[in-house]
């Protein structure tokens, strides 16, 4: 458990509990004495550390790996979180500071940091705020905000149907009210079952070597984490504007802060990835790779290929 300082964190004011666990999955502990820095791995939105089950054995062949759940997500503690009272910078701090305390408590003075999707955003913010521990930053299909051009393409036009225009209004209203997919699972009858079936089909159809039972269990795990008490998932609606437009905080957008990081940085996207890629000119210090035969969930779709890219980049940073 880590201790959160109530006076400086408005989501804890007046709340009696101030200690919350950071759920940690440790693989490859036998390598702890090897002298090689460990790997810290952070999951994406609506996921948890257990989603890396296919990739963890590959990543931990020669290194100790700590897969950790974001505070308020996965299996970590779920402090109350009032999104409408927070600025984007405050929300970032509430995601990052527990991890920095966790690293201190675990005695990790140097490590390589990997983050997938929303976890890539969290890890980028972590590296920008506390760069001293992080030897190398790896971003796996990271959420760094959609470009203006991408948003323009998806916005409804005057000639579009009323249904498409109505969908835009629904999205913007839900975003303003901090309604997330997790909210729908909790509130809407039948949503839990539909999302469980849809995610199970996705994992089985695109993921490499995932059996029917593994796809079903992974889907049940994801829906179970989404159905837990609401907490920091609403931070996504604070740290990004509707349609995932990046917000400005001290130091600029998250892309601008990644561009100023002192450590080696690389990013990997799938060749069938829906995530908006950072342009090379936006993050000139970041080496960008394309993983073949992969969608957004790189670690499930092509775990061997992803492991080869990541291990090579971490070796270069050594």
Image (cartoon, rainbow, N blue to C red):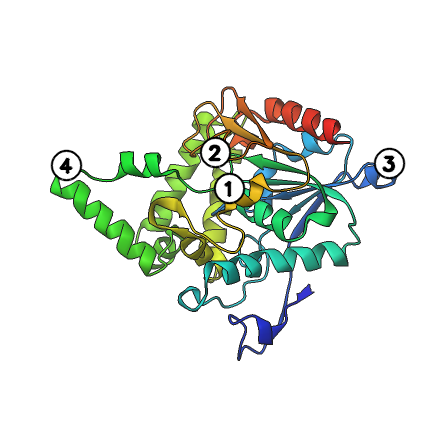
Instruction: Categorize mark 4 by other alpha carbons within 10 Å: few (<14), some (14-19), many (20+).
Output: few
Q: Residue at x 73, y 34 (%)?
A: 60
Q: What is the CA distance from the residue labelled 2 to the residue labelled 1?
A: 8 Å
- Locate residue 164, reporting x and y percent: 18, 41
- Labels 2 and 1 touching (C-beta < 8 A): yes
Q: Nearer the viewer, residue 153 or 257?
A: 257
- Labels 1 and 4 touching (C-beta < 8 A): no
Q: Earlier in the sequence, mark 4 or mark 3?
A: 3
Q: What is the CA distance from the residue labelled 3 to the residue labelled 1?
A: 34 Å
Q: Label 3, on which residue?
A: 34
Q: Label 4, on which residue?
A: 160
Q: Label 1, on which residue?
A: 255
- Locate residue 214, reporting x and y percent: 53, 34
Decide if residue 147 is in sight here: yes
Q: Earlier in the sequence, mark 2 or mark 3?
A: 3
Q: Residue at x 46, y 32 (%)?
A: 277
Q: Is residue 186 above or below residue 252?
A: below
């Amino acid at each position: 458990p880590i201790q959160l300082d109530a006076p400086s964190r408005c989501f804890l004011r007046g709340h009696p509990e101030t200690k919350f666990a950071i759920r940690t999955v440790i693989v490859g502990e036998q390598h702890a004495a090897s002298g090689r820095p460990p790997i810290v791995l952070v999951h994406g939105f609506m996921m948890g550390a257990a989603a890396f089950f296919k990739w963890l054995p590959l990543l931990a062949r020669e290194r100790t790996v700590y897969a950790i759940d974001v505070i308020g997500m996965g299996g970590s503690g779920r402090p109350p979180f009032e999104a409408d009272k927070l600025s984007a910078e405050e929300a970032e701090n509430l995601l990052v500071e527990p991890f920095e305390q966790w690293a201190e408590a675990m005695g990790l003075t140097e490590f390589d940091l990997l983050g997938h999707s929303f976890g890539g955003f969290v890890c980028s913010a972590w590296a920008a705020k506390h760069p001293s521990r992080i030897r190398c930053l790896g971003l796996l299909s990271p959420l760094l905000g959609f470009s203006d051009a991408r948003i323009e393409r998806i916005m409804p036009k005057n000639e579009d149907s009323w249904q498409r225009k109505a969908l835009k209004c629904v999205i913007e209203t839900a975003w303003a009210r901090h309604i997330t997919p997790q909210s729908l699972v909790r509130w809407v009858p039948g949503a839990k079952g539909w999302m469980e079936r849809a995610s199970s089909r996705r994992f089985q159809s695109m993921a490499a070597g995932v059996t029917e039972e593994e796809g079903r269990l992974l889907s049940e795990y994801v829906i179970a984490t989404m159905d837990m008490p609401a907490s920091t998932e609403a931070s996504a609606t604070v740290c990004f504007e509707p349609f995932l437009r990046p917000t400005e905080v001290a130091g600029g957008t998250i892309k601008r802060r990644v561009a100023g990081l002192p450590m080696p940085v690389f990013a990997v996207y799938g060749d069938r990835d829906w995530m908006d890629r950072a342009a090379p000119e936006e993050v000139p210090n970041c080496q960008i790779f394309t993983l073949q035969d992969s969608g957004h969930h790189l670690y499930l779709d092509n775990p061997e290929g992803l492991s080869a890219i990541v291990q090579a980049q971490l070796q270069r940073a050594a």
